[in-house]
Amino acid sequence: MTSSPSETETTVHPLQEYADRVAEAVGGTAEITFDTIKVKVPSEQWVSSLTTARDDLGLIFFSFLSAIDWSSEVAVGDPFPEEVEDRLELLVTLGDLSEGRRVTFSTDLDQESPAIPSLIEVFAGANWHEREAHEMFGIDFEGHPNLIHLYLPDAFQGNPLRKSYPLLSREVKPWPGTVDVEAMPGSDDEEEPEGPSEENPEA
Amino acid sequence: MVLDQDLVRHLSEASVSVELETPEMTLNIGPQHPSTHGVLRLVARVDGERAFDVQPVIGYMHRGYEKISEVRTYPQVTTLVNRIDWVSGYANEVPFIVAAEKLLGVEVPERAQFIRLILTEMARISSHLIFMASYPLELGAATPLFFALRERERVLDLLEGVTGGRFHPNFNRIGGVKPAYGSGSATRKVIQDLPAGFFAETRVAMDKVLYAVDELDALVADNEIIVARTKGVGILPPDVAASFGVSGPNLRASGVKFDLRKVEDYLPYHLFDFEIPVGENGDCWDRWHVRLLEIRQSVRIVQQAIDGIPSGPLQAKVPKIIKVPLGETYVRAENPKGEMGYYLVSNGNQGPYRLKIRTASFSNISILPWILEGVLIPDIIAIMGSLDFVLGDVDR
């Protein structure tokens, strides 16, 4: 992953042993980014891996399901400094209700026609979260009984949280951005504001 | 008197069916209804007095914060996130700013951490007091509202004195906190700290809150009508709650002794002595009672924090233009409504690349179709109110 941190490489993270155990049980690979355990599993075993996590690892609490649109070209915000592999990453965070363990499971989906079996039989709470991911990212959850818009009006077109989806108000009028940044008190060695950014072309 | 022969024949042929059937109807509640705490619409099939297949319709308040935050800087995003759950706006800021600090590797001064903790607990007290006011009102008891709101006002006045805002404090900065007092004086070098007398006044307010909690306890717990309407109503088993992601006081009311303040390290809660109240049956009564007990625990935490607050700066040294390094993390916190978390992905710029906002009320009300199946129509209000949600927290 392009966003992997390098800070934890020198010492073994205290969560490393647990992360490896989870990864082995569900058949994935573990990575720890800033105290967050992320276990990547192949999309074919998405449902079976999360069933294992619930039944064998005690991760019974369904925290959230969402996605990240990894794209080198973005219509809003700033792109990554280097090219990223274009894909949709589906995330599910589960937790236990005793020791406070939490694990984020992820799998990569194709950006063109993302589809994956629904988790609704494993976690009842996935119902609304999958509807949200469906309207926001266009992911097709196979076997979901009611895959209709959750937040957006019925006639809404497009998937707003995709990086290719423009923010129309921003197209019309640029945000003032850095104009009203106030200096931190007592910081003499602060950096001078940088030159014009795309958020504030007039600066 | 002449009898209408047709009517006589009709009546003599009519037979009374022993199995009385009521026509099935569709009942629409909301989107504007006092019990929905915002704009939530419920569509239910009703058969007589019972509701089936209740479908919540949400999204009336969707403001697209996840998308907007992709074009805002980190300090700007804090102003957005304290509008998510507006009855505890302060508590929303903390996990977001902690996530950004985690990626930056900033060490927050101890005094700032204590102040964050004190204000988070005060936000919890004010949020739970709103529940103490509104829930009995929804069940027809208006009196507790006055007791609870009087104390909430006391707490909000203190929050306003420190942050400048009652609902939207916007008080956290990356690396610390920024009091309203003494601000705007970068050239004059005024030492910034909390307003004089804040701690003394908070102590007084906490004592008064404790007294009011006892009053509320007596007012509601001794009220036979409220007890009858809440005991045994809307029972939520712990395994169902976990599967739907129901968290916070709603989960603890079902008997699960789990509190993120005890297991996560976003604020130094490990330094304080407090208990996790749990319910026994997971019914509406327990959900009310757990929140009442939590106010007492929050007061304990605030009192201990005031006793032990270290001196020192309120702000770590950070550059004026903050660029957060590449990385991703998930930080979750025990908010008044339950688990609030931010999955933050940074691409090394001034604003997030992606910010997933996990809100408690969203998962908490996704339980509605399950928990309202087959209940009496008046119980819909009792159960919905007991879940203590805010639509801003549902719709984001």
Image (cartoon, rainbow, N blue to C red):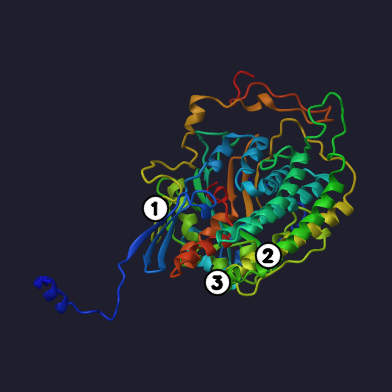
Q: Residue furthest top?
A: A202
A178 or A84: which is nearer to us? A178
Tags 2 and 1 on a common chain: no
Q: Secondary structure at mark 1?
A: loop
- Give the residue at mark 2: B219
Question: Looking at the picture, how far across and down is residue A69, in whole percent?
Answer: 51, 44
Give me the chain letter of mark 3.
B
The residue wearing badge 1 is A148
Q: Residue at x 89, y 42 (%)?
A: B312
Displayed quadrant of residue B106: top right
Q: Mark 2 vs mark 3: tell me if same chain.
A: yes
Cα–Cα gap, marks 2 and 3: 23 Å
| Amino acid on which the number 3 mark rests in the picture | Ile
Q: Identity of the amino acid at label 1?
A: Ile
Q: What's under tag 2, amino acid-wise?
A: Leu
Residue picked out by circle 3: B235
